[in-house]
């Protein structure tokens, strides 16, 4: 098959840049309007592919004449279609003008018709008004007549209701009085605008008088009924209807009745538990709560049908009981503070908190709390309304708004009828100033809360349920006396600390020992059990104190906790450190020790035990601080700070690590001394590693597994110990190398072999003799590799020839990059050079160092000068 390639000459002439290209949206629209399967109409038409499709083989080229004929025929048809379209467009302008003229004529005819319709509509409206003029007058008359009839009916009902009310009140038929009184009050509101009429005014006065008489009468009925009830009689059946009547009367009458009844109901309790009675003391506090429980049961049986449920009389009795009890207990405890013992106090608090929880469950839906919230909401709305309206602008017609003495509330009610002179005499300007000051305070408060409001609007508001009004209602009286509890816990902790110290002297530290096979044996935990005992006691104290109070008592308890944390760290940990030349005096004294620390394996395990214990105490102290801040009230959270105690345990951990490091150093010190005593210039052949390296490895294999197994629960501090040990051993090993002199070439090779063995020992130090091989931390490997590389380079310099002085010095500078002349002189002493050679090498070294210092100082000086110039320009710009 011979297809035509793209490189062949184009069949059709034409410039591709003149091709009209439509967007994809236009091409898609054209395809929808004029669908076509012809390849020539395709948007991605490819001429080469189209020709290859027409002539797929060489034999098909013979039909090229027929194909050309079809193409020419198609082109002629397209030309004819184009000419027809072009010719058709010549008549479009004429047709458009003709259509426009016809549209204009149609619009004129439509305008005339609309004008005629409008005139006819206005004429029709005039005729309709003439027809309905009398009907409107009749509608007004009907409306006035209906209003008059309604008013007369209300008046009739009002007159009759006042008369009936008088009779019903006299006969104490409260069930009918309640409904009738409500109706009379509602009807009387319709006559507010007719109060100027004497008859209406008299009726209103009669209603007001009857309401007052009714309130007095109901209070008298309740008092008579309660006197009879106390003497053993039964309650009058009409008291329940009387409560319904009270609902209709003034709210203050309802509050007065509730207050009187609650006071009467608790009179027997106040008499029995008077402060002079023996039963009033804390040891019999449960009898108080038992009295209220019996009273509420009797109330449910006798008064549930008297008082409406929404009055919440049982809850009011319980609240008044709690408030009076709190006051009496406060006075009793203040008078008998010397007789207040911790057991008695805890007993009273336990009984009180249990009673409060019972009341909170019994009155889960608090009616009193709802009333308080509604009152707060009304007060808030009233203040917002006062802010919105602002102060009065006409002092001649209204007196200045009165505010509270402290200026904390919005203006009070306005007194009508004051003259301008009176307003000026009463000092309206100071009142206005107080009002404006109040407005400014409100604006500042709104600005402070703007951010909080914006955050609250971002998330859907979740109504937070307020705690029950009963929680803490009585138990608050115990808070001033919780020092008795704190002092008791202080004594208990002192006894506990003595017992923990005695236990340690008896049992010692739990340790992990290593048997002959290298496997761990003994205890699986290396933490002193005394620390867990201490924090368990702390936890119990914290839970118990949080139940008693979340205020200052927790702050005092935290101070007690802090004192005994310090005592535990100093008395049980620091003072029992292994007896060394430092005497366990802490990290500072350990750093000053120059003789080394020698510990037995038991003392090493004991030090690890103290480290693990300090770590446990540190972590638990942090959790204790968080828990204290969680329990205590938010304003008191800054007073909770256990930072000093955490620092103490940090120092104990650092002391233990330093003690272990110095112990390993002391074990390796004899081997390093033996390394110096070797005659390195007499060694004639390089053999296996030296005996001192074998001794160091033996000490490390003996001590490190003990430390690792005893710090298995403190892995991060074991890694820290390894880092500190490497940072201490490597410089000491390098200093020991400097002391080996003179060293021959073979001796340097032997030292290099020993250095490599020592490096391998350090790299394997964290996992030496471990049952499970773990990879050492990358930071540790980096420190060992970098530190031991310097020792290897020192030995390579020692092995290099010194015949070419400058080359030797350059080699030293390149390998070690150490500008210290003393170290360079140590290397020369290791080579055993003569004094003249040493002086020559030192002179060349000093000269090269001065040259290199000058080359590096010039850019620094230039950079310093540029910084000074920038600073001068900045100063000039500012001034």
Image (cartoon, helix red, strand yellow):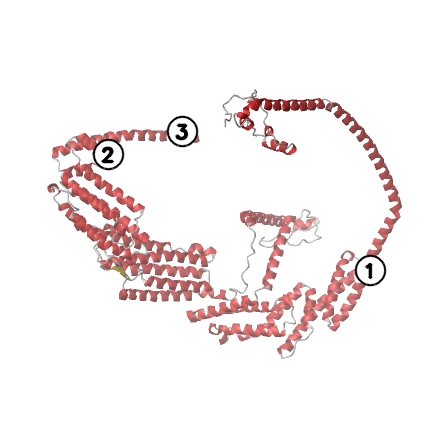
3 and 2 marks in contact (CB < 8 Å): no
Q: Is residue 41 left or right of residue 856?
A: right
The residue closer to the viewer here, 597 or 98, is: 98
Is residue 128 left or right of 817 when viewed as pictured?
right
Which numbered mark, 3 or 2, is in the foreground of this view?
A: 2
* Residue identified by numbered label 2: 814
Location of residue 536 by image quarter: bottom left
* In the image, farthest residue toward the top: 13
Q: Secondary structure at mark 1?
A: helix
Q: Is residue 879 visible?
A: no
Q: CA distance from mark 3 to mark 2?
A: 41 Å
Is the residue 122 above or below the residue 281 in the image? above
**Between disc 3 and disc 1, whose residue precedes?**
1
- Is 99 on the left-hand or right-hand side of 129? left
- On the image, the x and y values in percent for residue 455 come to 54, 48
Q: Position of residue 503 (x, y in %)?
A: 29, 66
- Regarding residue 711, the answer to whether it shows in the image is yes
Dot 1 alpha-carbon crowd within 10 angstroms: few under 14, some 14 to 19, many 20 or more: few
Disc 1 marks which residue?
A: 152
Residue at the location (85% across, 36% down)? 119
Q: Residues within 10 Å of mark 2 (few under 14, many from 20)?
A: few
Q: Measure how far apart labels 1 and 2 are at the Cα level.
A: 122 Å
Image quadrant containing the C terminus: top left
Return the x and y of residue 795 as percentages of the image width and height.
19, 39
In this rendering, the label closer to the viewer, 1 or 2: 2
């Amino acid at each position: 098959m011979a297809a035509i390639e793209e490189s062949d000459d184009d069949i059709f002439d034409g410039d591709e840049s003149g091709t009209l290209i439509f967007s994809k949206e236009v091409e898609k629209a054209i395809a929808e309007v004029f669908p076509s399967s012809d390849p020539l109409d395709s948007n991605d038409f490819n001429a080469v592919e189209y020709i290859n499709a027409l002539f797929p083989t060489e034999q098909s080229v013979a039909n090229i004449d027929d194909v050309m004929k079809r193409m020419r025929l198609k082109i002629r048809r397209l030309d004819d279609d184009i000419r027809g379209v072009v010719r058709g467009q010549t008549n479009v302008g004429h047709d458009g003008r003709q259509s426009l003229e016809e549209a204009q004529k149609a619009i004129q005819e439509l305008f005339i018709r609309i004008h005629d319709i409008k005139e006819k509509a206005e004429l029709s409206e005039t005729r309709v008004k003439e027809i309905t003029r009398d009907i409107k007058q009749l509608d007004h008359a009907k409306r006035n007549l209906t209003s008059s009839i309604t008013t007369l009916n209300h008046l009739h009902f009002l007159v009759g209701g006042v008369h009936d009310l008088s009779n019903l009140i006299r006969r104490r038929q409260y069930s009918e009085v309640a409904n009738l009184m409500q109706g009379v009050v509602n009807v009387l509101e319709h006559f507010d605008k007719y109060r100027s009429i004497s008859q209406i005014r008299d009726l209103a006065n009669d209603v007001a008088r009857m309401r007052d008489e009714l309130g007095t009468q109901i209070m008298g009925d309740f008092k008579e009924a309660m006197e009879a009830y106390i003497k053993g009689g039964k309650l009058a059946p009409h008291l329940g209807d009387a409560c319904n009547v009270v609902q209709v009367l003034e709210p203050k009458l309802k509050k007065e009745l509730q207050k009187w009844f609650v006071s009467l109901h608790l009179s027997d309790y106040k008499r029995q538990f008077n402060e002079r009675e023996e039963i009033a003391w804390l040891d019999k506090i449960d009898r108080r709560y038992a009295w209220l429980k019996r009273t509420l049961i009797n109330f449910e049986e006798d008064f549930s049908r008297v008082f409406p449920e929404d009055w919440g009389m049982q809850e009011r009795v319980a609240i008044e009981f709690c408030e009076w009890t709190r006051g009496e207990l406060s006075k009793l405890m203040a008078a008998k503070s010397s007789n207040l013992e911790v057991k008695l106090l805890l007993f009273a608090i336990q009984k009180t908190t249990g009673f409060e929880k019972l009341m909170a469950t019994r009155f889960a839906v608090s009616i009193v709390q709802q009333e308080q919230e509604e009152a707060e909401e009304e007060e808030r709305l009233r203040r917002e309304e006062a802010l919105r309206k602002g102060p009065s602008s006409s002092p001649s017609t209204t007196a200045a708004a009165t505010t509270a003495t402290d200026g904390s509330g919005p203006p009070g009610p306005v007194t009508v009828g004051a003259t301008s002179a009176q307003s000026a005499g009463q000092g309206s300007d100071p009142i206005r100033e107080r009002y404006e000051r109040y407005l400014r305070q409100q604006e500042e408060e709104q600005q402070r809360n703007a951010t909080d409001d914006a955050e609250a609007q971002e998330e859907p508001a979740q109504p937070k349920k307020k705690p029950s009004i009963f929680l803490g209602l009585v138990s608050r009286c115990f808070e001033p006396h919780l020092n008795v509890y704190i002092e008791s816990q202080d004594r208990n902790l002192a006894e506990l600390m003595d017992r923990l110290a005695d236990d340690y002297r008896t049992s010692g530290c739990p340790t992990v020992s290593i048997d002959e096979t290298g496997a761990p044996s003994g205890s699986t935990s290396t933490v002193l059990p005394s620390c867990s005992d201490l924090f368990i006691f702390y936890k119990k104290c914290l839970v118990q104190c949080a139940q008693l109070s979340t205020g200052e008592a927790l702050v005092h308890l935290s101070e007690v906790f802090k004192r005994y944390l310090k005592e535990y760290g100093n008395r049980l940990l620091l003072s029992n450190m292994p007896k060394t030349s430092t005497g366990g005096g802490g990290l500072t004294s350990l750093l000053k020790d120059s003789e080394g620390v020698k510990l037995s394996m038991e003392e090493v395990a004991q030090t690890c035990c103290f480290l693990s214990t300090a770590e446990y105490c540190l972590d638990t102290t942090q959790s204790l601080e968080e828990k204290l801040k969680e329990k205590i009230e938010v304003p008191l959270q800054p007073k909770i700070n256990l930072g000093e105690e955490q620092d103490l345990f940090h120092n104990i951990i650092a002391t233990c690590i330093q003690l272990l490091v110095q112990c390993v150093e002391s074990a390796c010190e004899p081997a390093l001394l033996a390394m110096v005593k070797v005659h390195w210039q007499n060694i004639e052949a390089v053999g296996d590693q030296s005996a001192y390296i074998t001794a160091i490895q033996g000490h490390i294999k003996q001590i490190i597994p003990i430390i690792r197994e005893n710090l298995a629960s403190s892995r991060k501090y074991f890694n820290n110990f390894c880092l500190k040990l490497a940072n201490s051993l490597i410089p000491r090993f390098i200093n020991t190398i400097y002391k080996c002199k003179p060293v021959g070439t073979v001796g340097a090779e032997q030292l290099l072999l020993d250095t490599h063995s020592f490096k391998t020992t350090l790299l394997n130090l964290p996992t030496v003799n471990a049952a499970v091989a773990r990879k050492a931390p990358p930071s540790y490997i980096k420190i060992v590799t970098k530190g031991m590389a310097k020792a290897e380079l020192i030995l390579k310099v020692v092995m290099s020839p010194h015949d070419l002085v400058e080359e030797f010095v350059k080699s030293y500078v390149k390998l070690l990059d150490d500008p210290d002349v003393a170290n360079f002189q140590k290397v020369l002493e290791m080579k055993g050079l003569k004094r003249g050679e040493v002086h020559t090498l030192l002179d060349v070294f000093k000269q090269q160092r001065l040259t290199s210092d000058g080359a590096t100082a010039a850019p620094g000086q230039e950079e310093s000068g540029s910084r000074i110039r920038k600073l001068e320009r900045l100063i000039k710009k500012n001034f």
